[in-house]
Image (tube, rainbow, N blue to C red):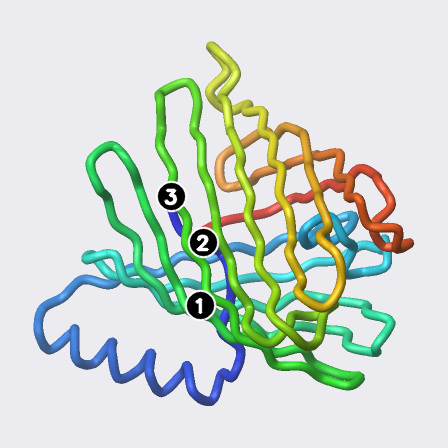
Amino acid sequence: MRIRVCIGGLPFLLPLLLALCMATAAAGETWSVSGTVYGASDERDRGLSLTAKDPGGGGELFLDHARGWFLGITARRMALVTGEDGELVGILGRTGETGAYDWAVNLAVHGLVGGRGRVFVEANAEMSRDFGLLLTYARLSAAPDGRWLERSGFVGDTRFGIEAPVPHRAFLALFGEIGMEWPTRTHPRGYWRLGGRVAVGPFLLSLAYVDTTSALTIGRAGFAARLSWSF
């Protein structure tokens, strides 16, 4: 399990990544590389469209340590009304196990490109448990000085989700998620999504119906599809 959020500020991340690689290589530690490239019919974040309901896409590259630490760099297309058209992102965090539960934590900085520009910090923590035919998870997020929509003030988020493989069809799975974002300067916004996905080798195709309590045009309910290739 790994929370896929990001650290912008690549000039800081790349030297840190190189230093850690050299240090752990000298100590005989093990790192592995993984990545994903994807295209989406609509890039959604907590129920709101980041691409004004237009197609989006991006990719990510992660470096995973045998002891649970991970570093990553990602990029994706955006189309915000404030002019930003992209996000350079990454992540620094750690995963682990406590009894039957898996956990992941990280501290991230997101950097928006173009328009007014924007950098914001966010901390995330997730706990999950696999019951065999059902995976459940809960996630908490906190941005002390806003995000891409709420650009000042504390913004918190809580979400709960389930994933269930289709019996006798291991390549098929159904999922559902419900969450609530808590900005201190405006009002809370609820969101949810329900859908399924099919895996064929390194390819994963998902389709979900997404809705939110927001009255914004970018929050109108609709279907969002995503096709990704992982390596």
Mark 1 Cα-neighbour bin, 10 Å: few <14, some 14–19, many ≥20: many
* Residue 97 image-quadrant placement: top left
Rendered location of residue 11, percent (x, y): 47, 89
* Residue 221 image-quadrant placement: top right
Compared to 138, does 89 lie above or below? below
Compared to 132, does 157 lie above or below? below
Mark 3 Cα-neighbour bin, 10 Å: few <14, some 14–19, many ≥20: many
Q: In terms of depth relative to the viewer, which is nearer, 53 or 228?
A: 53
Check disc 3 and report the residue beneath it.
127
Does the residue at mark 1 contact the one at mark 2 (Cβ under 8 Å)?
yes
Mark 2 Cα-neighbour bin, 10 Å: few <14, some 14–19, many ≥20: some
Compared to 223, does 217 lie above or below? below
Q: Looking at the image, is mark 3 or mark 1 nearer the viewer?
A: 3
Does the residue at mark 3 contact the one at mark 1 (Cβ under 8 Å)?
no
Does the residue at mark 2 contact the one at mark 3 (Cβ under 8 Å)?
no
Cα separation, mark 2 vs mark 3, equals 10 Å
The residue located at (19%, 57%) in the rendering is 67
Rendered location of residue 61, percent (x, y): 46, 64
The residue located at (20%, 36%) in the rendering is 99
Check disc 2 and report the residue beneath it.
3
The residue located at (76%, 63%) in the rendering is 186
* Sequence-wise first label, 2 or 3: 2
Instruction: Determine whether, in the image, residue 200 is placed left or right of residue 220.
Output: left
Check disc 1 and report the residue beneath it.
91
Look at label 1 and name its amino acid: Ile
